[in-house]
Structure formats: C-alpha cells, structure tokens
Image (spheres, rainbow, N blue to C red):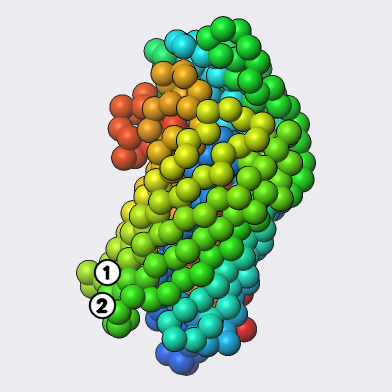
Amino acid sequence: MLLLRFPQYLYLIAACLISSPAGAQGAAENPAYSEPRGPIPIRNGRAFNQLVLQFVPESPDTLSSGKTKLGLQFDIFNNLLIPNPRGSSVEEDYEEQRLLLSWRKGLGHGSEMGVFLPIRYRNGGFMDGLLREWHGLWGIPNRTRDDRLGRRSSSDFRSRLKWIDSQGNALVDAKTAFGLGDVSATWKREIGRRTPRSALAARIGIKAPTGNPGQVLGSGSFDAGISLDGRYNVRRTLILFGNVGRVLSGGATRVPHAQRWVTDVMAAAEVRLNNRDSYLFQMEGNTLVVRTGNVRADEPQSTFTFGYQRVLDRHLVFHGSFSENGDWSAYSSTFFGGVGPDFTVSLGLTWRP
C-alpha cells in the first residue's frame, strides 16, 4: 500500500538514474569513479539541533587546488515527539523541507573551504499517512510507553513546535515558518600524508546568525567549532569514515537553556559494489543542544541512515537516503537511533566540473 501511494514521478527519476550511461573508458580515467565518495551529508534535523553549528558528514579528502564542487540537496524531516510531561512538556509535531546549497573549493596544500546555505520550510507536511503505513510494514510501534501521543492518536499534517516548562511558562510556541536558516562556512586541512589506504583532516567551522530566531529558523548567535575527519579503506569494496566535532555555541536568543558546548559524532561504512554504485550505513549523533527538562526529549540525540550513491557521469553524483530515529526499537538502542526526526529523506546531486 505504501508503494502504491508513493508519487509516481519518483519511480521515473529512479529509473533514469539506474539506466544512465557511463562508458568504461570514462570510469577508468575519471577520479569520480575511483575515489571514495564519503558519507551521506545529513545530520539530525530536529529543530533544536539545527540551532547549533552542524558539521556536515564528510570524507577527509580535499579538492585539488582550484577545483570546485557544487551541491544541491533536498531534505525532508518528519518530526513527531510528544512525550509524557515528566518535568516540562514538549510537543514537536511538524515536517520540515530543507534545500541545502553547498560550495567547496580546493585551496592547495591539502586544504579546502566550503560554504553551506540552508533554506528551510517548517509546516504540516505530507508524509504522516505514509509513515503510519511504513511503521506498520516493518512492525515499528506507532506509540511507546513514554509517549503521550503516537501516530495512531495524533491528527495528521500539524505544524507545532511547543515547549512549556514545569511552572507552566510557554518557552517556545512556533508554528509554520519559511526562510533562510543559519549559514555556515568551513576550512579543512589534511593532516599528514593522504594515501589510498587512509586519510585524516581537521575542519574549522563557523555559523552566522542569518536565520530568524523568533521562528526557530536560527539561533540568533555565532557558533564556532572544530571537527576531526578520518577515512580508512579496509579493502577496495569497504571504506570506513568517522567525524568527531566539538562546537562552542553562542546560545539561542529566543530559545532558553541552550548548551554552551556541543559534541557531535558520525560513523559510516561505504560498501562499493562497482565503480558507480555505493551503499552507506551511517550513524550520527550529538549531545544536547537545548536542555528542555523533559526526560524523553533530553535523551541521546541520534539517527541511523541507509544511503545510496551513484556516479551518473564524470561530473555528477547522485545520493539518496532515509534515516530513522529510535522509535523502531522503542528508543532502546541509541547507536541505531535516539531522539531525532521520526523519519528523514534526503536526495542530492553533487557537480564537479
């Protein structure tokens, strides 16, 4: 039933991607076919988590001097978190569509810079009914013992982000919003000598307060941080990636109890069946960005992602992925998903001239 309701144009896109031609000679000559393509560039899209600088999951490999890479990515975060009010009351029932534009340029000497511009739209969405069927297909509970409401008892297509403290004060009450999110920039430098077997790099990042803090589209403050990125090729068909970051947050001007320091981690395994197709298994998480005082909402923040990447031609690479939070296991397994969007879909194209 889920598949029957899925938009038919997505099937057409998938068919075109799978059937797109690429010659054997191009695969041999073009590094896009042989280089590790890296992890899926997605992080926990919960609204509070997006208030802080998020290092996009990346490979430590940098672009050659003067080379550029452009990215166009469309993400859908479907959020449903309405836990029992043990402490404060939190209600996150909304969907967000985000368009992420990225630009990277090689600076030489193993260094690279990047700029990331998100355009965000938080609304009632369209995926609620589909997700009920998705959960039913895999036997995922639509409600856990600590949730006041689940998908079976919550009305569809709501746009509500609400937080009331234990004294009854409304700290956040945001609904539909559209606009620019917080823009970030990074500078990455390889550490030591990169080899076909392994690589290590450090990234320095900064986030500017370009999003509207009153609509919870931005924090209203600058952030800065550093990330250590690694790659290790176990064999030609299996590549491991890892990122560990530490961010100094400037706080959030309209959301209280933002944490001063935030740590984020990412681990991914890329399985390459051939020169064009890769499958990614990925876990990412972070410490609390905002301490709400609700026991469930303040549990470990993490999601688990399954992704696919395909080299379409010598200039263009496609990625698609979906991510789950911890509801599939009643939040009993942090590594395979904790608190985050109920479901995330990401589609993207990377172009390198």
Give the residue at x 42% y 90%: 28
* Number of on-image labels: 2
Please tell me whether residue 18 is drawn above or below residue 8 in the rendered image. below
Q: Which residue does the image show at 38% across and 76% down from the upper left?
A: 190
Tell which circle, 2 or 1, labels the residue nearer the N-terminal end. 2
> Are discs 2 and 1 less than 8 Å apart at CB?
yes
Q: Amino acid at mark 1?
A: Tyr
Nearer-the-camera pick, 211 or 310: 211
Q: Position of residue 287 (x, y in %)?
A: 40, 38
Give percent across and percent down for residue 68.
59, 80
> Residue 17 is drawn in which quadrant?
bottom right
Quadrant of residue 90 within the rendered picture? top right
Residue drawn at (33%, 35%) of the image: 334
Task: Tell me the tag on residue 232.
Answer: 1
Residue picked out by circle 2? 197
**Whole-percent x, y for residue 33 in the image:** 45, 80
Task: Find residue 215 and name its label.
Answer: none
In the depicted structure, whether residue 174 falls above or below residue 340: above
Q: Amino acid at mark 2?
A: Arg
